[in-house]
Image (spheres, grey):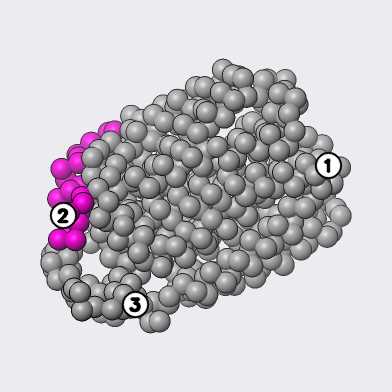
């Protein structure tokens, strides 16, 4: 080991280096490929993952629809109200960094129960209309659940047969939850129902998820997870940190994490501030502006379902570049055409083309890295992405909006799209070789 130079060791961390870890390929080849319907229990497990992502999507889209009402009710500025975006990052990152340990300690069953319980606690706090600092704490607790759901179920679905299509459906269901959220929340508050009552809806969904996840993954115990993901020689000196540290040494982890941070930052900044922008700069009525936000999430969801097949057929590598270029063009239309209807249509199509980006990155990671690193890498990358991207960037938009106006989100979002193009170009390419994927550069 001492004779190896640092550069090749880092460069060959992924599948190219599997020849130096012969036990793993041998074990994987002997196990039949799992799918959404084999074994039969997987149908229920995939359904449980879909329900969890419905809750996750409803959670992420709720804040944007409620920002005008939170600001008015608490009498606070855009900068302060943006804390409800940034504080979940703490919980999200905490769960995502510890995801490998959580899986080995609790198993998939325990992770599902833990995540749904954290969501339930956060929503129970929000539904009581607490003082704003307590609301922020509740959002942080909900972030713990979001981090575990995002990493755990992405890794689980990504290891099944036909991951592109399945991840497209999983993230499409996330979009379905995000569609329902602004519609229900806006319908409630425009009828005079206090905004906090919406969190009772989320509480019911999350509470249901506790029992659904427990039943679906009941046999997915910590012992079974540890048997499926045995500790390697390099981890025996530090069981809890070895696999995470190995994942952190891969540049794929950092590139995919940075990409997801910029992607989720653009997605949530748009979804979170559409209502405010349409009211203030397109003279939209409250309900119509809320529907424009729903239009973005409808396009987002439709894109994940409709484009999953084309992404798999023509390859994630090329299609992600195409989607990003189309998104940039539509963002210019949204920014410069001063029409409510043009803005609503362009932002809906913008959502359509950015929808497949997140699952495409997850598929790329599962192809570039061995399966034993999937939970750690996806957990960390999603933690950076959804943790940083879904919180820090919308907060920055809020701070800018307070000083310069919410229209300044447009150049900010455009810069995030350009950054994604650069990072996707930096990610290694891959191709099939027999029954496995290998990097080509």
Q: Quadrant of the C terminus?
A: bottom left
The magenta region covers: 214-239
Mark sitting earlier along the chain (1/3): 3
**Residue shown at 15% from the left, 43% from the top:** 223
Q: Quadrant of the N terminus?
A: bottom left
Q: Is residue 270 left or right of residue 283?
A: left
Which of these two is toward me, 345 or 202?
Answer: 202
Above-or-below relation of 328 to 138: below
Residue, disc 3: 7
Q: Are marks 1 and 3 in contact (CB under 8 Å)?
A: no
Q: Is residue 296 left or right of residue 92?
A: right
Residue, disc 1: 280
Is 236 included in the stretch rendered in magenta?
A: yes
- SS label for mark 3: helix
- Using the image, tell me which numbered label, if any, was put on residue 251: none
Front tag of 1 and 2: 2
Q: Position of residue 131 (x, y in %)?
A: 61, 20
**Residue shown at 51% from the left, 58% from the top:** 260
Circle 3 crowding by C-alpha within 10 Å: few under 14, some 14–19, many from 20? few
Q: Are marks 1 and 2 in contact (CB under 8 Å)?
A: no
Please indicate, yes or no, whether residue 316 appears anywhere in the rendered image.
yes
**Residue shown at 15% from the left, 61% from the top:** 233
- Using the image, tell me which numbered label, if any, was put on residue 236: 2
- SS label for mark 1: helix
Circle 2 crowding by C-alpha within 10 Å: few under 14, some 14–19, many from 20? few
Q: Position of residue 31 (x, y in %)?
A: 16, 61
Mark sitting earlier along the chain (3/2): 3
């Amino acid at each position: 080991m001492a004779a190896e130079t640092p550069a090749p060791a880092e460069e060959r961390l992924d599948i190219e280096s599997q020849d130096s870890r012969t036990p793993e390929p041998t074990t994987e080849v002997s196990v039949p490929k799992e799918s959404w319907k084999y074994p039969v229990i997987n149908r229920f497990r995939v359904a449980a993952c879909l329900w969890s992502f419905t809750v996750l999507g409803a959670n992420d889209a709720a804040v944007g629809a409620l920002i005008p009402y939170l600001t008015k009710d608490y009498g606070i500025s855009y900068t302060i109200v943006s804390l409800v975006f940034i504080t979940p990052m703490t919980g999200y990152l905490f769960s995502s960094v510890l995801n490998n340990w959580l899986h080995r300690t609790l198993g998939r069953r325990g992770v599902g129960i833990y995540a749904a319980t954290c969501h339930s606690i956060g929503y129970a706090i929000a539904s009581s209309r607490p003082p704003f600092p307590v609301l922020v704490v509740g959002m942080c607790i909900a972030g713990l659940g979001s981090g575990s759901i995002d990493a755990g179920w992405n890794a689980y679905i990504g290891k099944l047969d036909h991951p592109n299509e399945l991840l497209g459906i999983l993230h499409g269901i996330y979009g379905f939850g995000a569609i329902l959220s602004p519609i229900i929340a806006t319908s409630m508050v425009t009828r005079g129902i206090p905004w906090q009552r919406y969190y009772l809806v989320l509480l019911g969904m999350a509470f249901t998820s506790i029992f659904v996840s427990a039943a679906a993954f009941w046999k997915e115990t910590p012992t079974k997870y540890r048997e499926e993901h045995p500790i390697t020689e390099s981890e025996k000196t530090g069981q809890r940190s070895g696999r995470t540290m190995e994942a952190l040494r891969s540049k794929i982890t950092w590139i995919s994490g940075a990409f997801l941070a910029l992607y989720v930052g653009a997605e949530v900044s748009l979804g979170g501030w559409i209502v405010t922008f349409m009211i203030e700069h397109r003279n939209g009525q409250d309900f119509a502006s809320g529907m424009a936000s729903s239009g973005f999430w409808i396009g987002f969801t439709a894109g994940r379902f409709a484009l999953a097949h084309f992404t798999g057929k023509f390859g994630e590598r090329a299609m992600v570049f195409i989607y990003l270029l189309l998104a940039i063009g539509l963002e210019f239309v949204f920014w410069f055409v001063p029409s409510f209807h043009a803005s609503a249509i362009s932002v809906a199509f913008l959502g359509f083309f950015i929808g497949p980006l997140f699952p495409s990155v997850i598929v790329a990671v599962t192809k570039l890295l061995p399966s034993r690193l999937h939970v750690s890498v996806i957990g960390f990358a999603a933690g950076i992405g959804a943790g940083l991207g879904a919180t820090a960037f919308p907060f920055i938009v809020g701070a800018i909006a307070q000083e310069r106006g919410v229209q300044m989100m447009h150049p900010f979002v455009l810069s995030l799209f350009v950054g994604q193009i650069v990072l996707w170009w930096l990610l290694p390419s891959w191709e099939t070789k027999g029954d496995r994927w290998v990097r080509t550069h």
